[in-house]
Every structure is written in structure tokens, then in C-alpha cells.
């Protein structure tokens, strides 16, 4: 395993990070680790420059795990190439493997490095001279906003740590890496309530008033800045998690608290945000663009919090492009995911769904029990399905790209997307469509496009409210309305209220879990959702299913991969080097 001794590097001493990408006009910058501490504190402009570099610590999910995606560590996908980090670590239960370092171990190092930068801003701002070009009022406002941003960032980075390692030591001072690093930790870890409720949520709540307003943050020269809506949205997510089965007893947060948090966002910011839907555009395309565009790259009012990046070209998507298009296959969706999509009329293709949101497969069978009334036919399994399926998954016969015969996906044996001897060909029979800008494939792969990483979008707020309110009241009109808004935007015709199978709380709970999974597929929700629902063992240890398509186009189901997930894997192991240095007790089972 890679050790975390890099925690003591020069970049940490200076509080910097490598700025590999741009974050919009306001946030374009060089890495702040080029600055000495004297220069950083010498003027307000340099200090602001140092602070803005914190935006570089927001991570992009594409190919982050040694070429693979976090959702390839769940039941939603399998990485095609053998060296993918999810495949060499998570999928086989190897949580000390080097292929998953960027997620399993580097998270600890990079988040604490980001937190140290925030602590410098919070603790050293008073040492920075005033900006004589500003009025006293503007100076005070700018300092208050920067302080609020630093505290919000710090809360978010600690939240990222919590999801992976549980409550970790809360460091609010600027530690000197050249001195004793053990004493500040003292081997102690806070409780869930102390960490999340008393610190993270408190930081967000106290910072929100001084963050930029919607009007300020969404102006042309400030796109991407932290804002009041972003803090409120993050609080909605955290309270939903804290009300969930895994955390509720320790956090004291109730489902009513979670419902109120989501509702407050809808009430206060619902007029500023919505579900992206351009007129006269195919619903599936609108759904796909909801994660590719922002307010300034396509008038998208759905995205609340995102990582901004420069435009990419063919090299940015080739790892996740079908082999027949010249790509490496990459993140290949599973039949498990495909089976979660409803029919286009809103009916369910299968009879029963479990607590993971997946349809129930009979023992020894690869096919769930079919709901004949839906019109679903396993021999034509992609017909008349929820349009989000075609916006997320490339399956046999799908029009795509420019480099193959007829420009359609062909996974028949020996054909373009399943050639004999190509180790990168899809193991599941599917390739990924979502998060891949089609314009890059134009002109023989000569195009370019933005692929920004969406962290929170408005659909999540609606889904948060539906989930929490169902737990409080059971199925009711408000729950139906939230779900219908999300589903109708995607092109589903039927109304949830008309479904006879969704009249009790338990059935609606499983339905909402299914809806979250398909709506947010490949957006890094599934890994944390199944954990907070306390169903991660059930969801992540089941086999990955796929399909074979023969030369006549006949489709048969298959098992593509076995998976390993044990109870101890709810949390990652704390990197060994940090355990040795700090005396912290590692997570249970590690």
C-alpha cells in the first residue's frame, strides 16, 4: 500500500495544491504553492489568490480511480480494462491495493491538505493588510465572504472524509508539519454527532449568511463561487444522510429535519433553480445535458454546486468510449442498472424491488419476475423504457459515433464493439453514454466540449424531499409531485400516484431508492446511498450481470463478474502511515 508520508510535503507546508484545471474567469490561477508564506500574507490580492486555489481541491469523478469511476465499485458498472482501480481494489475486496489509492488513501491526504489551507485563511486573515483600493464597507464584506467560503470548504472536505473514514480528528489550527503531528490528534476521534451535527452542519449554517447571494454568485465573472444556495443544498444532503438508518440513532437528526431542510431550499431558492429542460428538445437529451452544462456553458439552471474545468477533447473521453469508436471501453454499465429503469409509460417492468432499489431476482435466476401488464419483454428489453436509460447506457443498435459501420453500437461476437481478442471490449454488453459529450466525436473526433463535474443539482433536492417526506408521512401528494417532476422531465408519461403498487411506505421507500439510483447513475451517489440505507452488503456483494447478443440479435443474460463486499467495508481503512504516526484506532475490521 502507498503510505501517506506525502502529508509532510512542501505543498502542505505552503498550503498549496497543483492547479491542473481552470475554474472559470474569476478562478483562473496558478498553483498557490508557488507562493511563499511571506508573499501570501503580504497583500490582500495575494491572500485572495491563495484562497481561490482551494477550488482546485474539488475533485472530478471521471476516471479518478486509476482510470475507473467510483460507480464501477458499485453494482452499476464494471471497468472493462484490467488495470482500472475499481477492478483491482474494490471489486475484489482489496482495500489496500495501489490501484484505488486516489480514493482509498489519497482522500485522507488531499482533504487534510485542503483543510490546512482553509485553516490558514481562517486563522491568518487578520495578519493581511487592508486593501486600500476598497472602501471600509467593501473591505469588511470581502473579508466576511472569504471567511465564510473557507469555513464552507472546510466543512465540505470534512464531510468527504466522514463518508469514507467516519469521524476523523477535527483540526482547526494551522499545524506545523515540521513539528509534532501526534499530539493534536491524541488518538481521539469524535462521535458522529460531534463531528457532523456539532461541527460540519454548524459551520455551514453559520457561514451561509456571509456567502455570496444567488445574484452575486451567478454573475458572469463569479460563476463557480461558493454561495448561499450551495451551503443550503449541502445541508439538505447531510441531514438526509444523518436521518438515514445507518446514522439516525447517533446523529439525532430526524426524517422531519431532513424534509424541512430540503423544503427550505425549495421555498427560498426554488425560483432560481429548476430541472433543465429546453423546449423542443428530446427529454433524454435534456436529462443528459443536465450534468454537462452549467449556467454559463448552456443556460442550465439545475446545477447548484459543481467543479469547473476547461473544455476537453477526444483524449478526455477515449478511456470511456466503445472500442469500435477507438476507445478503451472503460466504465461499462451493468444489467443490474438497466433492470432498474421503468417503462416509458411509468409502469414497472418487474414485480418486486428490494431495499437496495433493485428488482428481486429469484434464486438461481438472472431475470427478475416480470410484470406482464407493463408490456416488458426480455427478448426486447430496451424497448419502450424510461428515456433516462438511452441517455445513460449505450446498448446494441444505439446510434453513436462516427468511426464504425452504420455508426451504431454493435456488441455481437467479432463485431466492432466486441472484436475477438480485444481485452477492453465491454464485459457487460453495454457502454456508457452519460457524461460523454457527443460533440467530441464529430469531425473524426476533432470536437471539444465542457464536461464539468456536478456535485449537487436541483433534482437531488426534490429527491431528498420525497425520500424524507415519505418516511414522515408515507406516500402523499407532495411525494408524488416531487417524483413526477423528476420523471416527467426525463420523458416518462405516467404519474406515480396512479401506481397501485406504491400505496404504502415500504414499497414507496424501495421505489424512491430505485429512482435515486437511475437519476444519479455515475454521479457518485450509489456508493454512499447504499451505505446510509444500511444495505451495502446486499447491494455491493451481489454479482454484476450483463448480456450477450448473438449474430441474429438475440439477447441472453449472463453473469459478468462476482463481487466482494464485507461489513467492514462500510468504511475505508485509515491509511497505515497515518495510524502509525497518530496512534488513531483504525476502523473496525481493519
Image (spheres, rainbow, N blue to C red):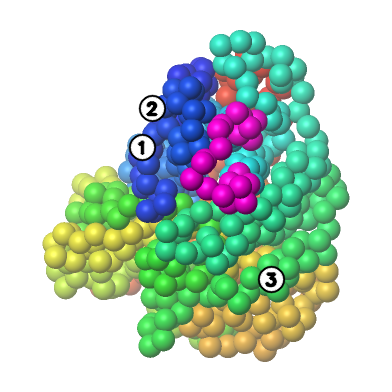
First to last magenta residue range: 122-143
- Which percent across, then down, holds residue 208? 68, 54
Using the image, determine if residue 539 lies above or below residue 8.
below
Q: Label for residue 416? A: none
Is-magenta flag for residue 141? yes
Graded by Cα atoms within 10 Å as few (under 14), some (14 to 19) or many (20 or more), the crowding at tag 1 reads some
Residue 325 found in image quarter: bottom left
Graded by Cα atoms within 10 Å as few (under 14), some (14 to 19) or many (20 or more), the crowding at tag 3 reads few
Q: Label for residue 30? A: 1
Q: Name the residue under label 3.
A: 268
Q: Label for residue 34? A: 2
Using the image, determine if residue 13 lies above or below residue 222.
above
Q: Do the residues labelled 1 and 2 touch (CB within 8 Å)?
A: yes
Is-magenta flag for residue 474? no
* Foreground of the two, 255 or 75: 255
- Which percent across, then down, holds residue 30? 36, 37
Amino acid at each position: 500500500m502507498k503510505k501517506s508520508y506525502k502529508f509532510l510535503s512542501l505543498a502542505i507546508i505552503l498550503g498549496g495544491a497543483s492547479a491542473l484545471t481552470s475554474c472559470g474567469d474569476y478562478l483562473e490561477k496558478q498553483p498557490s504553492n508557488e507562493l511563499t508564506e511571506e508573499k501570501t500574507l503580504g497583500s490582500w490580492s495575494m491572500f485572495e489568490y491563495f484562497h481561490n486555489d482551494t477550488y482546485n481541491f474539488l475533485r472530478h469523478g471521471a476516471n479518478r480511480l486509476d482510470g475507473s469511476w467510483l460507480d464501477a465499485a458499485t453494482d452499476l458498472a464494471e471497468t472493462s480494462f484490467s488495470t482500472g482501480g475499481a477492478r483491482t481494489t474494490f471489486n475484489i475486496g482489496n482495500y489496500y491495493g495501489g490501484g484505488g489509492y486516489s480514493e482509498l488513501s489519497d482522500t485522507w491526504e488531499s482533504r487534510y491538505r485542503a483543510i490546512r489551507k482553509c485553516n490558514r485563511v481562517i486563522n491568518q486573515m487578520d495578519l493581511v493588510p487592508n486593501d486600500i483600493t476598497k472602501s471600509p464597507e467593501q473591505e469588511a464584506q470581502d473579508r466576511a465572504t472569504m471567511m465564510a467560503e473557507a469555513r464552507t470548504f472546510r466543512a465540505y472536505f470534512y464531510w468527504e472524509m466522514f463518508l469514507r473514514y467516519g469521524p476523523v480528528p477535527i483540526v482547526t489550527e494551522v499545524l506545523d508539519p515540521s513539528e509534532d503531528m501526534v499530539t493534536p490528534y491524541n488518538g481521539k476521534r469524535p462521535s458522529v454527532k460531534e463531528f457532523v451535527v456539532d461541527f460540519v452542519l454548524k459551520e455551514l449554517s453559520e457561514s451561509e449568511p456571509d456567502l455570496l447571494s444567488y445574484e452575486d454568485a451567478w454573475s458572469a465573472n463569479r460563476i463557480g463561487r461558493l454561495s448561499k444556495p450551495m451551503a443550503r443544498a449541502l445541508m439538505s444532503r447531510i441531514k438526509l444522510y444523518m436521518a438515514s438508518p445507518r446514522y439516525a440513532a447517533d446523529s439525532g437528526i430526524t426524517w422531519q429535519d431532513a424534509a424541512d431542510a430540503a423544503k427550505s431550499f425549495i421555498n427560498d431558492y426554488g425560483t432560481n433553480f429548476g430541472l433543465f429542460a429546453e423546449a423542443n428538445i428530446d427529454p433524454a437529451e435534456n436529462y443528459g445535458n443536465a450534468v454537462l452544462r452549467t449556467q454559463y456553458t448552456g443556460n442550465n439552471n439545475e446545477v447548484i454546486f459543481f467543479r469547473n474545468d476547461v473544455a476537453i477533447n477526444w483524449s478526455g473521453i477515449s478511456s470511456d468510449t466503445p472500442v469500435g469508436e477507438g476507445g478503451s471501453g472503460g466504465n461499462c454499465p451493468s444489467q443490474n442498472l438497466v433492470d432498474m429503469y421503468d417503462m416509458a409509460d411509468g409502469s414497472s417492468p418487474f414485480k418486486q424491488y428490494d431495499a437496495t432499489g433493485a428488482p428481486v431476482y429469484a434464486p438461481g435466476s438472472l431475470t427478475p419476475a416480470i410484470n406482464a401488464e407493463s408490456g416488458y419483454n426480455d427478448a426486447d428489453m430496451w424497448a419502450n423504457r424510461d428515456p433516462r436509460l438511452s441517455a445513460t447506457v449505450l446498448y446494441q443498435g444505439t446510434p453513436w459515433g462516427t468511426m464504425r459501420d452504420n455508426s451504431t453500437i454493435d456488441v455481437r461476437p467479432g463485431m466492432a464493439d466486441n472484436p475477438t481478442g480485444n481485452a477492453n471490449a465491454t464485459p457487460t454488453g453495454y457502454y456508457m453514454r452519460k457524461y460523454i459529450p457527443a460533440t467530441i466525436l464529430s469531425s473524426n473526433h476533432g470536437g471539444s466540449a465542457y464536461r464539468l463535474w456536478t456535485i449537487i443539482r436541483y433534482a437531488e433536492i426534490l429527491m431528498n424531499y420525497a425520500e424524507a417526506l415519505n418516511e414522515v408521512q408515507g406516500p402523499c401528494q407532495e411525494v408524488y409531485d416531487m417524483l413526477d417532476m423528476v420523471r416527467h422531465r426525463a420523458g416518462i408519461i405516467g404519474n406515480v400516484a396512479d401506481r397501485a403498487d406504491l400505496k404504502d411506505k415500504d414499497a414507496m421507500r424501495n421505489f424512491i431508492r430505485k429512482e435515486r439510483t437511475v437519476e444519479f447513475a455515475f454521479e457518485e451517489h450509489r456508493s454512499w446511498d447504499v451505505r446510509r440505507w444500511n444495505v451495502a452488503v446486499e447491494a455491493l456483494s451481489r454479482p454484476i450481470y450483463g448480456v450477450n447478443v448473438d449474430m441474429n440479435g438475440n439477447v441472453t443474460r449472463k453473469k459478468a463478474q462476482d463481487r466482494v463486499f464485507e461489513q467492514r467495508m462500510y468504511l475505508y481503512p485509515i491509511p497505515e502511515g497515518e495510524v502509525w504516526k497518530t496512534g488513531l484506532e483504525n476502523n473496525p475490521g481493519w
